[in-house]
Image: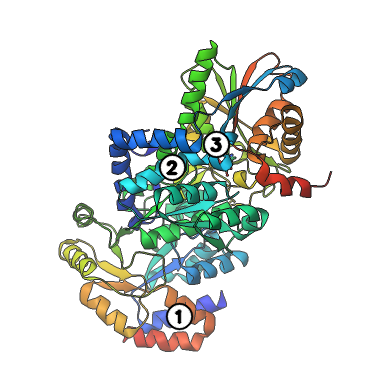
Amino acid sequence: MAGGYYGRFGGRFVSETLIPALSQLEEAFTAFKRDEAFCRRFRKILSEYAGRPTPVTFASNFSKAYGLNLYLKREDLLHTGAHKINNTIGQGLLAKFMGKRRVIAETGAGQHGVATATAAALLGLECTVYMGSLDAERQRINVERMKLLGAEVRVVEEGSRTLKDAINAALRDWVRNVRDTHYLIGSVVGPHPFPEVVAHFQSVIGEEAREQFEAMGFMPDVVVACVGGGSNAIGIFRGFVDEETELVGVEAGGLSDEPGRHARTLGLGRPGILHGAFSYLLYDEHGNITDVHSISAGLDYPGVGPEHSFLKESGRVRYEHCRDDDALFAFKELSRLEGIIPALESAHALGYVVKNSPQMSGKNVLVNLSGRGDKDLSIVLGVKE
Amino acid sequence: MKTFDEALEIALDAGFDFIEVGVPFSDPVADGPVIARAALGALKKGVNLKLILDYLKGKRLGERVDLYIMTYSNILWAANPGRLSGVLKECGVKGCIVADLPNEEHPFFKRAGFELPLVSFATPESREEDLLKLAEVKEAFIYFVSVRGTTGGSFCLDADTQRKLLFLKERAKVPVVLGFGIKSREDVEKALTLAHGFVIGTKAIELLSEDIKAFERWCREIAG
Ligand SMILES: Cc1ncc(COP(=O)(O)O)c(C=O)c1O
């Protein structure tokens, strides 16, 4: 990371109006990391409220069935049911640190929206969440949860009515209210310094997992995580980049490789500019963003965090994909074999492992189980056998 | 395209010195609902950069008025900035206004071979250090965005913003033009006491989507 770029990826491609706010955020973030009291408060909330540290579970039945050693980093056990809370508590405290009274957020599956509303309730911040109307339909329960938590949910009817459009709406809100509002972005995307801020707060996943493996006396051979914007993946990868460990990011393969039927940003996209960063992106010959598809609302995004683009080109991380039906299969398989219902997002990482289990035979494989799957039951039940 | 053609002639007759031609982008985050809707509508009809450039070239519009392209970063990036700047020059385009390209990222496009002037922005949030840097700008003009927000909204400058504007106008080496929310003759007169020029977008598009006669009357009124 130098001057807001990871190699050639990153930057701050936003309206000039937002530049001073991003500079302020960068300065505050640097000061925040050095502020003992705030850091102590962050760790205390993570442990006493959110439920850290999360365990690493050895999935013995699954391991036996597939001929490898599967370990799960259990972010699904966190309060609100996903890794998203690590980031929202961190940024919520950062917003307080900067003296902002209001936070706004975008949400796809609703997980980040719920986690933001939760942190806002805890910390006494006003909260508005933008959500595409298609997602609001798919994830009605999460809309109700956010409202219950005191957040205002604004449904976005523009464009593809999904995550991308929710981010557009949040950016428009931020430009108008930049003086008293912090944009609590939900993944390692957006203009600098957001990708670094979110990566910092999520890196607790990898740090913990690394210590947990050290205590067991070995390191995993492979670490696998799903990649939407890329925050749970960066979070766990950061604990292992300096090891020999193989790192695999799994994107949503959707239905096929045809344009509009997948969300394989790193696999099939090219570098481009959206939502403040130069990074891999799915767009057409004229530069307009392509529609994407995934069974999982949290992976249904045409962009990806700039650090992933860098890690792809440097070769440190390999990016693969998992199709909708393989993710569904893994969703059911983990539920049946281990009594753990994974989020459909995390099921993409598992689906990749299932599909490639012959090549991983006998290896120690760590999967970031980024969330739990209760929110996805209606989607899974809605899919015809 | 027919409305666009007529509108252009009307604007030229009314005596505007420069014309911005918007190239639609699928995710116009800096725009309010009126321009965003117009952009998405144009995209649906198949409007794109190449089509617009062919049209501008055919009309030799660059010979009659200062012509600027207004768009988003990814549209320029996708066209290959190095190759595109040659094409833009051939079409008589003077420069580009890129809504999601802040001043500090201009070098990103220059490094990629983009040779045309990129318009710099000042805003109510600009700090003194930003304004001093803007005073050194030598390309195109400086676009002072009058409000915190997207295009549309109403034209109103608080005292602090007026102070920043005058500070910049006194020092700038290129014209400072004011935009966002300007709708009426009254707004224009106010803008001209503070800046060297003004930009109008939303109101023009609003009127054009109603009827061309209203647009024509309004152009005359604005131009005074
Ligand atoms: C459980 C879960 N995992 C993963 C993601 C994808 O986001 P990211 O790639 O930033 O981890 C989401 C997003 O909503 C999620 O809810």
Image coordinates for residue A259, horizontal then vertical, percent: 67, 48
> Chain under label 2?
A
Q: Nearer the viewer, mark 1 or mark 3?
A: 3
> Chain under label 1?
B
Nearer the observer, A90 or A54:
A54
Callouts 2 and 3 on one subunit: yes
**Vertical arrangement, residue A126 with respect to residue A368, above or below:** below
Q: CA distance from mark 1 to mark 3?
A: 63 Å
**Vertical arrangement, residue A289 with respect to residue A216, above or below:** below
Q: Nearer the viewer, mark 2 or mark 1?
A: 2
Write down the residue under mark 1: B9
Query: What numbered label is drawn on residue A78?
Result: 3
Q: Amino acid at mark 1?
A: Glu
Give the image quadrant in which the ligand numbered 1 is located.
top right
Q: Earlier in the sequence, mark 2 or mark 3?
A: 3
| Secondary structure of residue under mark 1 | helix
